[in-house]
Image: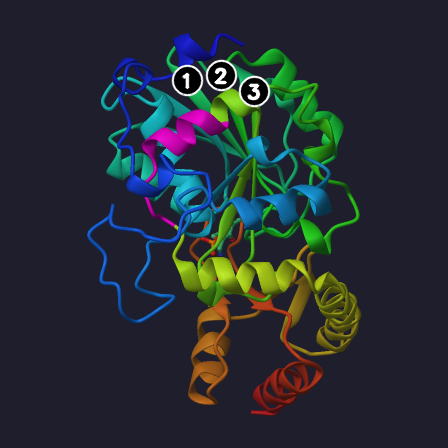
């Protein structure tokens, strides 16, 4: 991989903003460098721009080095920055499996980048050759979401590695739902695939969507570019504080995941017995894609009962489908009871 050739020329020669706290790494007791207010400790101070404590803890848990980690305002920041680092507006393009997470295309549109979709097959799989055939000399990114939203399936790692080895651009592997999957993470293969960026998030299994904290893992040169392009203090002090709390109590996450996987099995079984349910797709995530009779009607009915699911009826390959997040046992029971009543109407 020739990173210098892949990165936009203006980013390659960018002199990044150097914040006051960036330049300081020793011990000091008087901070008169950043025009802060000396009152209202500790939130009067700008946060660590490189989130060193969070990265140290995360690196140990994930078996990577801190320099392989970028932290952003949700994975959405990691997605947008990939366009801003690599894709020349009006010239470059990206290739993505379809359907997949909507922000890849929204960010492409915002950045004026052509978005090429390669439709999944009827079992939501793809052939690496079809993805590669959609690329050309101006293709900078390939998007693979695994487990995929909204289809729920994870892809075998060897398929992703095959694409990474054959493609001279960057392969973006979005693993937002990886904690619910037993198919394995690309994190273990970062060293052999220097052109892969793995995105993960605190929003799903980690139960902290409100914090807005996403992670990009990649080789240190790519992470350097992320750090140059991000806002100086992108991850706020409260988020860093809460992330450190989360990372020192990971058993909690393991307990949640186990319970949600049990609930996924139970919910799928209960849904199977309902009249309007036609098919439940296998899931490696914390949601089920469910094909039903008259999805718009059922969606409206559930809405009126105060139960909100995601209507995917108009998404390619998902006609007839609702996407249902796995909730608590009680929430899932409410959903099942409501659909039971709907069937009886
Ligand atoms: N990737 C995928 C596949 C998602 O489904 C979502 C959110 N629904 C995100 C990324 C965004 O996550 P975050 O909250 O970290 O921005």
Q: Under tag 1, what secondary structure?
A: strand
Q: Is residue 150 magenta?
A: no
Disc 1 target residue: 139
Q: Are marks 2 and 1 in contact (CB under 8 Å)?
A: yes
Residue 206: in sight, yes or no? no
- Residue 195 placement: quadrant: top right
For the record, the magenta segment spans 223-234
Residue 343: in sight, yes or no? yes
Disc 2 target residue: 169
Q: Nearer the viewer, mark 2 or mark 1?
A: 2
Q: Which numbered disc flags the more N-terminal residue, 2 or 1?
A: 1
Q: Residue at x 43, y 64 (%)?
A: 238
Q: Residue at x 64, y 70 (%)?
A: 326
Q: Is residue 231 magenta?
A: yes
Rendered view: 87 above or below 277? above
Rendered view: 84 above or below 202? above
Q: Are marks 1 and 3 in contact (CB under 8 Å)?
A: no
Q: Residue at x 71, y 43 (%)?
A: 60
Local crowd size for mark 2, using a 10 Å CA cut-off: few (<14), some (14–19), many (≥20): many
């Amino acid at each position: 991989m020739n990173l210098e050739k892949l990165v936009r020329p203006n980013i390659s020669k960018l002199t990044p903003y150097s914040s006051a706290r960036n330049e300081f790494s020793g011990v000091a007791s008087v901070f008169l460098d950043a025009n802060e207010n000396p009152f209202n400790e500790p939130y009067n101070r700008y946060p660590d721009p490189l989130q060193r404590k969070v990265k140290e803890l995360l690196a140990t848990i994930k078996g990577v080095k801190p320099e392989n980690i970028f932290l952003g305002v949700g994975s959405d920041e990691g997605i947008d920055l990939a366009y801003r680092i690599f894709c020349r507006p009006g010239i470059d393009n990206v290739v993505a499996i379809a359907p997949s997470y909507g922000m890849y295309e929204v960010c492409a549109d915002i950045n004026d980048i052509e978005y090429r979709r390669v439709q999944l097959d009827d079992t939501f799989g793809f052939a690496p050759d079809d993805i590669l055939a959609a690329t050309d000399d101006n293709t900078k990114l390939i998007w693979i979401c695994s487990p995929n939203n909204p289809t729920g399936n994870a892809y075998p790692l060897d398929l992703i590695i095959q694409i990474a080895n054959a493609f001279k651009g960057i392969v973006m592997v979005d693993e937002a739902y990886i904690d619910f999957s037993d198919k394995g993470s690309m994190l273990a293969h970062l060293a052999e695939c220097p052109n892969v960026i793995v995105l993960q998030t605190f929003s799903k299994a980690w139960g902290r969507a409100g914090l807005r904290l996403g992670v990009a893992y990649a080789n240190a040169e790519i992470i350097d570019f992320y750090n140059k392009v991000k806002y100086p203090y992108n991850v706020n002090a409260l988020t860093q504080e809460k992330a450190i709390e989360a990372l020192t109590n990971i058993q909690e996450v393991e307990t949640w995941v186990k319970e949600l996987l049990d609930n996924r099995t139970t919910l799928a079984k209960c849904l199977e017995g309902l009249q309007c349910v036609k098919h439940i797709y296998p899931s490696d995530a914390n949601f089920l894609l469910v094909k039903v009779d008259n999805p718009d009607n059922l969606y409206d009915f559930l809405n009126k009962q105060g139960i909100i699911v995601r209507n995917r009826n108009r998404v390619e390959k998902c006609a007839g489908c609702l996407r249902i997040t796995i909730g608590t046992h009680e929430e899932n029971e409410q959903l099942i009871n409501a659909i039971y009543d709907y069937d009886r109407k």
